[in-house]
Image (tube, rainbow, N blue to C red):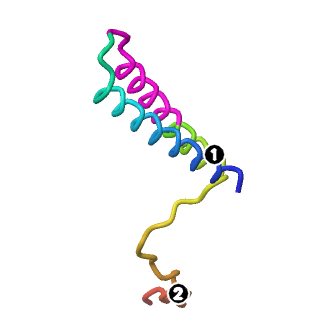
Amino acid sequence: MLVKAIIIGLLLAIVTSLLTSMVFLVRDRSDQRRTLTGLKIRVALSITLLVFVVLAWREGWIQPHGLVRTPPPTSSPAPSPAP
């Protein structure tokens, strides 16, 4: 549960950084480059999220699953060798 909370927190931080940069782009007329700084933070957070998800997968904290699940293999008797 903690891993999912960290992932959601990072996603919210990324969206917040993106929205903040958008506001600075539209409203800020100064030369402080706050838009660029906000976008740098967003890229850093995105890389952090990617590394964390890969680390969590490698450590077994999260398990990948697909949208379409394949049925488990059936246990059928092995064919007998030909005489």
The kind of residue on which mark 1 rests is Ile
Q: Position of residue 20 (x, y in %)?
A: 42, 33
Q: Quadrant of residue 52?
A: top right
Q: Is residue 29 above or below residue 59?
A: above
Sequence-first tag of 2 and 1? 1
Kindly identify the residue that appears in the image at 49 percent across and 89 percent down: 80
Label 1 environment density (alpha carbons within 10 Å; few <14, some 14–19, many ≥20): some
Q: Position of residue 62 (x, y in %)?
A: 62, 55
Q: Is residue 68 left or right of residue 48?
A: left
Q: Quadrant of residue 75?
A: bottom right
Label 2 environment density (alpha carbons within 10 Å; few <14, some 14–19, many ≥20): few
Q: Which residues are magenta?
A: 31-48
- The residue tagged 2 is 74
Query: Quarter holding the N terminus?
Result: bottom right
Query: Quarter holding the C terminus?
Result: bottom left
Q: Is residue 29 left or right of residue 13?
A: left
Q: Is residue 71 above or below residue 7?
A: below
Residue 47's disc is: none
The kind of residue on which mark 2 rests is Thr
Q: Position of residue 25 (x, y in %)?
A: 30, 27
- The residue tagged 1 is 6
Magenta-colored segment: predominant secondary structure:
helix
Q: Which is nearer the eye, 40 or 54?
A: 40
